[in-house]
Image: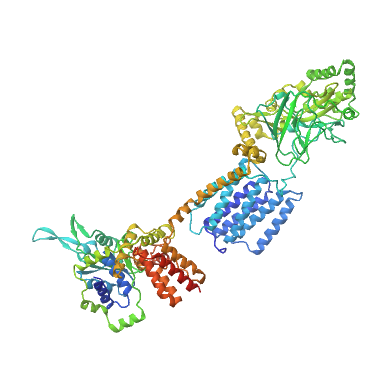
C-alpha cells in the first residue's frame, strides 16, 4: 500500500515541481479524511495541486469557482418545479461529488461560505426538510488568497477549524522554476497522469494508519505543545481538543507514509505548521498572519525530551 | 535587563507606592516637602500620558540645589531625625522624575522600603503598623510589576502580593516572639527636640492646672493580683520639692543625695506592680508611697523618690513594689530637717496668723487641725482661680481663697514651716482610671496632683493632703468625673474631652481602645520585657534547644507549604532513564556550545553532533535509533546499560 502512496506523490510531483513536502502534507490530509485549505497568492499552483490530487486519487471531481454573487443554492442544489410531473424535483448542486475543488472560497459571501462549510462538517445536505447524503469519500480542497487582498471575506475561526490542514505552497526553487519553464504548462499533463489508487485502496490505507501507535513519551510531547498554547498569554486562544486530535491523527498517517508503525517527534514537527497555524493567532493580531510565527515558537520553545 | 522599559501598570503602581510612603510623614514634614513630592509624581504621570516631557539636566540640577537649600533652611533650628528623614523624602521624590528604566524603578522601590520604615521613628501605634503593612503591600506590588513582562490588569499583582506577604507575616511573628533581644549596637535618637511633658521640676501654685487641660497618658500600671489599692491610697510620688523662694517650690542647691531602703517596720500590705511610663524627656519615675524595692538602673533618692539616670526618651517599663501604711523615714538627720524649715522673707500676714494659731494650739495635730478647719470653712476648689501677685501666700489666704492642689499644698507647707514643723511639697499623680478589660490603671496628665509631707514628732514624715480637706471628692473620685464640670478641664484637647466627658457607651468604647493600646504597648512595643515569661509559658521549660525548635519548626512548615507545588512538579518531572541520559549528554556538552536546543529532536541532535565529530557518527546514529525505539516504538528490549555506556563514550570523545 505504501508503494501506491509513494507513486501517488511521485506522479503529482511531475506536475508541481519541487514541492514534495507540500504534496506529502496534502496527501496526508486527504488520507486522514480531512478537508484541505490551500492559501497562497494567485498563480502559485494551488489549482494545479488540487486538480492533480483529485485525478491521481481516482476520484469523481468537480470544481466551483466562488464569486461574490454566489448563493448557497449554486453549490448545494435546488428544488425545481417539474411541470410534467406536477411536483418539485431536487437538482443536485456541484457539492455532490467525491472531490470538490472550491476555488477562492474567500471571494464569496459568508452566507455561501457557511453553506459549504456546513456540508463539509455534516457530510450531508438538507434542503426543504429532505436530507441528501454526500458521496463517500468526500473531500473539499479549498483555495484562498491571502486575507489582506482586496475583495475577500475572511473565514472566521470556527470555520477555519473545519479544515484539517492549511498549507501554503510558496515560490518554487530556482531549479524547480527552470524545470517548469522548460516543461511548459503542467496542467495540460494532468489528464495523462496515471491513477494511483483503486477504489478500495483508500479504506485499506486508512485502516493501516489507524494501527500506528503513539507512545506515552510522544503523547507527553504533544500535550506539552498544546498546553503551551493554552497557558502562554500571547495566544488569543489555545488549541482545542479537536486540534490536538487532528495533530495526532495526521501524525499517524505521516508516520505510516514514512514507513513506520509508531510516531516520532519529527512527524509531529512536520505537521505542526499546517495543522496548528490556522487555529492560532496572537492576542493583538486580527488578520491571522501570526499563526505560522507562533507555531515556530512552539517548535523552538517546547522541549521534545522530558 | 536593566534597560527594560516599564509597563503602564508598573508606572502607576510606582506612583502609588511613592504616595503611600509619603502619607505617614505628613505630620512632621514641612508643608513644602509633600507638595514637592506630589508635584513630581504629577509630573511623572503627565510624562507617562505623553502630555509633558521629562525634565532636562538643568532643571534637575536646579531642583536638587533648591530642595537641598530648602531642607537646610526649614531645619535651621535643628530638627533632629526629622531633618534627615526630610532629606531622604525629598531625594526620593525627585528621583521619581528619573524613572524610565527598570533600574531606576528598583532604586525608588528599595528606598520606599526605607522611607516607610522611618515612619516608626515618629509614631509606633497599632494603626501605624497596620498602615505600614498596607504600604509594604503596595511597594511589593510595585516591585512585582517591574518584573512582570506580560500585560496584566491593575489589581491583579496586588492580590498576588498578599500570597507572598501572608506567609511572611507568619514567619515575622515567629521571629518576633522567639528571637532573643540584644541591645542595639547603634541607635537612632528619637526626636529629642520635642518638649518635656508631665510634671516640671519646680512648682508654683498655678502649675498643675496646665496639666489638667491635657488628657495625655502619663503612665499605666498593672498590679500583681489584678485589683488595685483603693483610690484614696493611690498617691504616685514623682518629685519632692524642699526649697521655697517665696513663689516657687524646687530643689535648689542641694540635689537629693542617694538613699537606702531600710527594712519596713510594719508590712501592712505589699503591692507589686509594673509601671509603663510614657516618655517625658525628664528623669522622675512616679511610684506609690513607701517604696520597698529599688529596680536595677534607677536611683533611689534620699526622699524615697525614684529617678532614672537619663531622661526618659521612650516608653519604659519598671517593676516596683510598695508597702502602704509603712512610715516613711523615721531616722531623718538634722540637716534634712533644718532644710525643711527654711523660708524666705515676706508673706508677713500669713506668718503672723501661723504664730497666733501655734500659740493657741496644744500640739502639732491641733495646729494642723486649725488650718484644715480654715480651708474647710472659707475656701473653694477651682481649676481656674484668680491670678496671684507677689505675696502669694498672703493673697491666697486672705484675699482670693480659691485654688487647687498647688495653692493648698504650697500654703500649708508655708504655714507648717513658719512654726517650725518641717514640711515639703510632693508633686505627682493621684488616682487613675481602672480599665477592667485589660486590668490596669491608666493615669493621665490631668491626674497630676500636689500634696505635702510633714515631719511629726515620733511619726516621721506623714503625708498631708490639704486639697482633700477642701474637696475630699478630688481624692475619692477619678479626676475625669470630678473635673468634667469644671471650665478649664481639658481645654486644650477638645476631641479627647468629647470622649471623656461624653456618655456611658463612649466611655466604654474609649476604655476598650485604651485597653487595646495598653496591650499593644505591653506585648509589641515593650515585648522584650514580657518575652522571657511568655516563652517560658509557651515552651514549658526555657532551653536553647526548645527555643531553636520553636523558631525552626514554623519556618520548615511554611517553607514546605510554599514549596509543595514545586515538589509535586519535580516528582512528575522525574525523567525516564533514556531521557535522563540524553539530558546528561546535552548538559555535559553545554560548555562546548553543543547542548540540545529545546525543540531539537534526538535524531536531529545526534546528526548535529555527528557533523561535529564524524568519527562518532555511527555511534551517535545508533544512540538516536535506540532512543527512538525505546521512547517512541515502546520496545522493551533495549539494553539500558549499553545505552548508558554509549552516552558516556560519546560524551568523553566529544569533550576531548
Total of numbered circles in the picture?
Answer: 0
On the question of residue B303 being in view, the answer is yes
Q: Quadrant of residue A201?
A: bottom left
In the displayed structure, A228 sits above or below B611; it is above
Foreground pick, B587 / A54: B587
Please report the residue visible at 80 percent of the width from the left and 35 percent of the height from the top: B201
- x, y (%) of residue B410? 82, 27
Query: Hey, which residue is sitting farthest left in the picture?
Result: A84
Q: Nearer the viewer, residue A23 or A98?
A: A23
Examine the rendered structure and indicate whether residue B12 appears above or below residue A304: above
Q: Which corner quadrant of the image does residue A306 belong to? A: bottom left
Could you tell me residue B271's position as x and y percent? 71, 28
Residue extending farthest to the bottom is A182
Looking at the rendered image, the quarter that the N terminus of chain B falls into is bottom right
| Residue B369 horizontal/vertical position (percent) | 82, 18
Looking at the image, which is closer to me, A155 or B563? B563
Q: Residue at x 88, y 15 (%)?
A: B360
Q: Position of residue A252 (x, y in %)?
A: 30, 65
Q: Residue at x 49, y 68 (%)?
A: B588
User: Is residue B653 toward the left or the right of residue B35 in the image?
Assistant: left
Q: Nearer the viewer, residue B286 or A249?
A: A249
Q: How is the image coloured?
A: rainbow
Determine whether, in the image, residue B70 is placed left or right of residue B629: right
Q: Indicate whether B85 appears above or below B366.
A: below
Residue A67 shows up from this direction:
no
Amino acid at each position: 500500500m505504501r508503494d501506491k502512496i509513494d507513486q501517488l506523490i511521485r506522479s503529482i510531483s511531475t506536475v508541481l515541481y519541487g514541492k514534495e513536502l507540500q504534496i506529502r502534507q496534502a496527501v496526508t490530509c486527504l488520507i486522514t479524511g480531512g478537508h484541505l485549505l490551500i492559501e497562497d497568492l494567485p498563480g502559485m499552483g494551488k489549482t494545479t495541486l488540487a486538480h492533480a490530487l483529485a485525478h491521481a486519487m481516482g476520484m469523481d471531481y468537480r470544481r466551483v469557482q466562488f464569486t461574490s454573487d454566489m448563493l448557497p443554492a449554486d453549490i448545494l442544489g435546488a428544488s425545481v418545479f417539474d411541470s410534467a410531473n406536477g411536483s418539485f424535483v431536487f437538482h443536485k448542486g456541484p457539492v455532490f461529488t467525491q472531490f470538490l475543488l472550491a476555488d477562492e472560497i474567500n471571494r464569496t459571501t459568508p452566507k455561501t461560505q457557511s453553506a459549504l462549510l456546513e456540508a463539509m462538517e455534516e457530510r450531508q445536505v438538507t434542503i426543504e426538510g429532505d436530507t441528501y447524503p454526500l458521496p463517500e469519500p468526500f473531500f473539499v480542497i479549498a483555495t484562498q488568497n491571502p486575507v489582506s487582498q482586496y475583495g475577500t471575506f475572511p473565514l472566521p475561526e470556527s470555520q477555519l477549524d473545519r479544515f484539517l490542514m492549511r498549507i501554503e505552497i510558496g515560490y518554487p526553487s530556482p531549479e524547480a522554476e527552470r524545470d517548469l519553464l522548460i516543461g511548459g504548462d503542467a496542467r495540460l499533463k494532468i489528464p495523462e497522469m496515471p491513477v494511483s489508487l483503486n477504489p478500495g485502496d483508500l479504506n485499506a490505507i486508512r485502516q493501516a494508519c489507524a494501527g500506528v501507535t503513539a507512545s506515552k513519551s510522544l503523547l507527553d510531547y504533544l500535550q506539552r505543545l498544546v498546553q503551551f498554547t493554552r497557558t502562554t498569554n500571547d495566544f488569543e486562544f489555545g488549541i482545542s481538543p479537536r486540534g490536538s486530535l487532528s495533530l495526532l491523527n495526521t501524525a499517524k498517517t505521516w508516520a505510516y507514509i514514512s514507513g513506520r508503525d509508531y510516531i516520532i517527534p519529527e512527524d509531529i514537527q512536520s505537521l505542526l505548521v499546517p495543522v496548528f497555524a490556522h487555529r492560532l493567532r496572537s492576542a493583538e493580531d486580527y488578520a491571522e498572519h501570526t499563526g505560522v510565527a507562533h507555531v515556530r515558537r512552539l517548535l523552538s520553545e517546547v522541549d521534545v525530551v522530558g | 535587563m536593566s534597560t527594560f522599559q516599564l509597563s503602564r501598570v508598573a508606572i502607576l503602581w510606582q506612583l502609588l507606592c511613592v504616595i503611600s510612603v509619603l502619607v505617614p510623614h505628613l505630620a512632621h514634614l514641612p508643608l513644602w516637602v509633600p507638595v514637592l513630592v506630589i508635584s513630581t509624581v504629577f509630573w511623572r504621570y503627565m510624562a507617562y500620558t505623553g502630555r509633558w516631557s521629562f525634565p532636562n539636566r538643568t532643571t534637575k540640577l536646579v531642583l536638587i540645589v533648591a530642595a537641598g537649600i530648602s531642607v537646610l533652611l526649614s531645619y535651621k533650628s535643628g530638627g533632629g531625625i526629622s531633618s534627615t528623614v526630610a532629606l531622604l523624602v525629598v531625594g526620593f521624590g525627585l528621583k521619581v522624575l528619573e524613572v524610565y528604566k527598570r533600574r531606576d524603578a528598583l532604586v525608588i522601590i528599595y528606598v520606599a522600603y526605607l522611607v516607610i520604615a522611618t515612619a516608626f521613628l515618629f509614631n509606633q501605634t497599632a494603626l501605624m503598623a497596620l498602615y505600614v503593612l498596607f504600604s509594604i503591600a503596595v511597594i511589593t506590588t510595585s516591585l512585582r510589576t517591574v518584573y512582570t513582562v506580560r500585560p496584566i490588569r491593575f489589581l491583579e499583582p496586588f492580590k498576588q502580593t498578599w500570597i507572598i506577604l501572608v506567609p511572611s507575616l507568619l514567619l515575622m511573628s515567629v521571629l518576633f516572639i522567639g528571637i532573643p533581644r540584644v541591645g542595639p549596637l547603634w541607635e537612632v535618637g528619637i526626636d529629642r527636640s520635642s518638649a518635656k511633658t508631665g510634671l516640671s521640676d519646680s512648682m508654683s501654685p498655678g502649675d498643675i492646672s496646665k496639666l489638667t487641660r491635657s488628657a495625655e497618658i502619663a503612665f499605666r500600671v498593672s498590679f500583681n493580683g489584678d485589683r488595685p489599692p483603693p483610690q484614696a491610697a493611690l498617691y504616685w510620688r514623682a518629685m519632692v520639692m524642699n526649697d521655697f523662694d517665696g513663689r516657687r517650690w524646687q530643689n535648689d542647691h542641694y540635689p537629693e543625695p542617694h538613699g537606702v531602703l531600710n527594712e519596713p517596720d510594719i508590712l501592712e500590705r505589699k503591692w507589686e506592680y509594673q509601671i509603663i511610663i510614657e516618655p517625658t524627656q525628664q528623669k522622675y519615675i512616679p511610684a506609690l508611697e513607701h517604696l520597698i524595692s529599688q529596680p536595677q538602673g534607677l536611683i533611689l533618692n534620699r526622699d524615697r523618690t525614684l529617678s532614672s539616670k537619663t531622661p526618659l526618651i521612650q516608653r519604659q517599663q519598671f517593676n516596683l513594689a510598695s508597702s502602704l501604711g509603712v512610715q516613711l523615714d523615721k531616722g531623718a538627720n538634722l540637716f534634712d530637717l533644718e532644710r525643711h524649715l527654711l523660708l524666705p522673707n515676706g508673706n508677713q500676714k500669713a506668718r503672723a496668723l501661723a504664730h497666733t494659731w501655734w500659740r493657741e494650739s496644744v500640739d502639732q495635730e491641733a495646729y494642723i487641725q486649725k488650718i484644715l478647719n480654715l480651708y474647710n470653712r472659707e475656701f473653694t476648689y477651682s481649676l481656674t482661680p484668680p491670678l496671684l501677685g507677689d505675696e502669694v501666700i498672703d493673697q491666697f489666704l486672705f484675699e482670693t481663697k480659691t485654688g487647687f492642689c498647688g495653692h493648698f499644698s504650697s500654703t500649708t507647707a508655708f504655714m507648717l514651716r513658719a512654726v517650725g514643723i518641717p514640711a515639703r511639697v510632693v508633686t505627682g499623680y493621684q488616682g487613675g482610671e481602672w480599665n477592667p478589660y485589660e486590668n490596669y490603671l491608666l493615669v493621665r496628665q490631668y491626674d497630676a496632683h500636689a500634696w505635702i509631707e510633714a515631719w511629726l514628732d515620733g511619726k516621721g514624715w506623714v503625708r498631708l493632703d490639704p486639697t482633700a480637706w477642701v474637696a475630699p471628692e478630688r481624692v475619692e473620685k477619678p479626676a475625669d468625673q470630678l473635673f468634667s464640670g469644671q471650665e478649664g478641664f481639658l481645654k486644650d484637647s477638645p476631641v479627647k474631652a468629647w470622649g471623656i466627658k461624653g456618655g456611658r457607651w463612649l466611655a466604654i468604647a474609649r476604655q476598650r481602645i485604651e485597653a487595646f493600646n495598653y496591650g499593644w504597648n505591653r506585648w509589641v512595643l515593650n515585648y522584650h520585657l514580657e518575652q522571657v515569661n511568655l516563652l517560658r509559658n509557651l515552651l514549658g521549660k526555657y532551653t536553647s534547644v526548645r527555643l531553636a525548635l520553636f523558631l525552626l519548626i514554623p519556618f520548615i512548615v511554611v517553607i514546605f507549604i510554599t514549596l509543595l507545588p514545586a515538589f509535586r512538579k519535580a516528582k512528575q518531572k522525574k525523567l525516564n532513564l533514556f531521557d535522563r541520559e540524553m539530558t546528561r549528554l546535552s548538559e555535559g556538552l553545554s560548555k562546548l556550545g553543543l547542548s540540545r536546543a529545546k525543540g531539537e529532536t534526538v535524531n536531529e541532535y545526534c546528526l548535529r553532533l555527528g557533523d561535529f565529530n564524524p568519527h562518532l557518527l555511527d555511534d551517535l546514529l545508533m544512540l538516536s535509533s535506540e532512543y527512538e525505539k525505546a521512547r517512541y516504538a515502546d520496545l522493551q528490549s533495549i539494553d539500558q546499560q549499553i545505552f548508558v555506556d554509549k552516552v558516556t563514550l560519546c560524551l568523553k570523545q566529544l569533550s576531548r
